[in-house]
Image: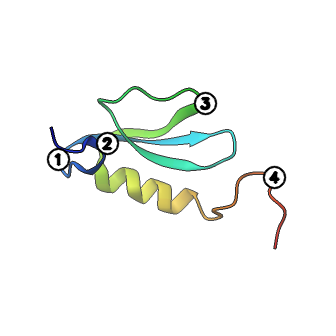
Amino acid sequence: MPNPFEDPDGTYFALINDQDQYSLWPQRVRVPAGWAVAHGPGDRESCLAHIESQWTDMRPAGAPAS
């Protein structure tokens, strides 16, 4: 079975957690606890574009500024 996280023809979600961190997630894999759908379902590129446009600070929410 190919890796569902790297299927160029798959359907994906952009997930977000309570720390405002994002993850690309295959639609066919159950969304893990603590994560919510922020975008999708959609193709891999549209979900990645959503993540790139929204996740501008890689630090978890509440992390001190450097």
* Residue 62 position within the rendered picture, expressed as x and y whole percent measured from the top left: 81, 52
Hey, what amino acid is under mark 4? Gly
Hey, what amino acid is under mark 2? Gly
Q: Is residue 65 left or right of residue 23?
A: right
Q: Is residue 23 left or right of residue 12?
A: right
Work out whether mark 2 precedes mark 1 in sequence or the reverse, and give the earlier one.
1
- State whether residue 49 is above or below residue 19: below
Q: Which numbered tag is attached to residue 27?
A: none
Work out whether mark 3 precedes mark 2 in sequence or the reverse, and give the earlier one.
3
- State whether residue 47 is above or below residue 29: below
Front tag of 1 and 3: 3
Picture residue at 51% right of the left edge, 61% below the top = 53
Q: Which numbered tag is attached to residue 42?
A: 2
Hey, what amino acid is under mark 3? Gly
Q: CA distance from mark 2 to mark 1?
A: 10 Å
* Residue 24 position within the rendered picture, expressed as x and y whole percent measured from the top left: 41, 47
What secondary structure is marked by label 4?
loop
Work out whether mark 1 precedes mark 3 in sequence or the reverse, and give the earlier one.
1
Q: CA distance from mark 3 to mark 2?
A: 21 Å
Q: CA distance from mark 2 to mark 4?
A: 30 Å
Residue marked by disc 3: 34
Residue marked by disc 4: 62
Picture residue at 38% right of the left edge, 50% below the top = 47
What secondary structure is marked by label 2?
strand
Front tag of 2 and 4: 4
Query: Which image quadrant: the N terminus?
Result: top left
In the picture as drawn, the residue positioned furthest to the right comes out as: 64
What secondary structure is marked by label 1?
loop
Q: Quadrant of residue 4?
A: top left
Residue marked by disc 1: 9
Residues at discs 2 and 4 in contact (Cβ within 8 Å): no
